[in-house]
Amino acid sequence: GAVVSQHPSRVICKSGTSVKIECRSLDFQATTMFWYRQFPKQSLMLMATSNEGSKATYEQGVEKDKFLINHASLTLSTLTVTSAHPEDSSFYICSALGLAEQETQYFGPGTRLLVL
Amino acid sequence: AQSVTQLDSQVPVFEEAPVELRCNYSSSVSVYLFWYVQYPNQGLQLLLKYLSGSTLVKGINGFEAEFNKSQTSFHLRKPSVHISDTAEYFCAVSDPNDYKLSFGAGTTVTVRA
C-alpha cells in the first residue's frame, strides 16, 4: 500500500515552454500532497503544499505564478512549470499524506526536468 | 520551526559490517521523526518512523533507530550491511500540526565488498 506515482519520469523541453508533472496516489486517497525540488547532491526543498479542493500554499521564495499547482481530486495533484528556463532544471518529487496515516508522507519516484 | 543535522555526510562501510547514521534535531514542540532512503535517480522510501511509544523503532531491510529525547537524537543503525544498502539516507522531522517535513542534508552510505 501507499504507492505514489509520477509522470513523466523524465522530460526535456525548450526554454519558454510549459511542462506539467502529475502526481498520483495509486492505492489510497490523499487530502494533502507536497511538492519538493532537489538539486544534485542536496537535500529536498519543500516548494508547496497542495490540498484537495483548495489553493496550494507556497513556501517563501517560491513563485506561485511560475509553479502552478492543482489538486483536483483525492488522488491527483499536478505541478506545471510555466515558461521554463534552464535554471528550472531539477529533480521534482511529490509526496502524499494518507487519510488513514496522516502523519506519514509517501514519496513518488521523481521527475527529472531538463530545460534546454 | 524545526531543524535537522546529519552529522556525517559520507559513511563508507564494508559489507557485513555494522553502520550507524547520526541524526540530531531541534524543535520547540514535540515532533515526529523519520528516516528515508533514496537510491540513485529515485524518490524516497520510508525506512522507519517514530511517532510515540517505544523509543526503539524497527523498520524495513533490517534497520532500526532509537529516539533519545534528552539528546534530541534519532540515530539509525543496521548490524550488518549489504552492497544493496548503498544509497542516500535522509533524517526528517515533522510538526504534528501540519506534517511538513524538514530534512537533514543527507548521508551517503557506500558499502564495499
Image (cartoon, coloured by chain):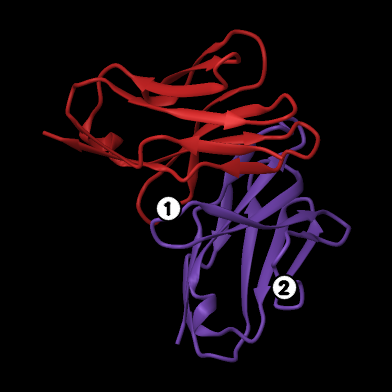
Label 2 sits on residue:
A63
Residue B34 location (% of width, % of height): 56, 31
Q: Amino acid at mark 1?
A: Gln
Residue A37 location (% of width, % of height): 56, 61
User: Left or right: B60 with respect to A45?
Assistant: left
What colour has chain A?
purple
Q: Amino acid at mark 2?
A: Glu
At 70% across and 78% down in the image, what residue appears?
A66
| Figure quadrant of the N terminus of chain A | top right
One can see residue A110 in this view: yes
Residue sitting farthest toward the top: B54
Residue situated in front as seen by the camera: B94 or B25: B25
Label 1 sits on residue:
B42
Quadrant location of residue B81?
top left
Residue sitting farthest toward the left: B113
**Helix, strand or loop under label 1:** loop
One can see residue A1 in this view: no
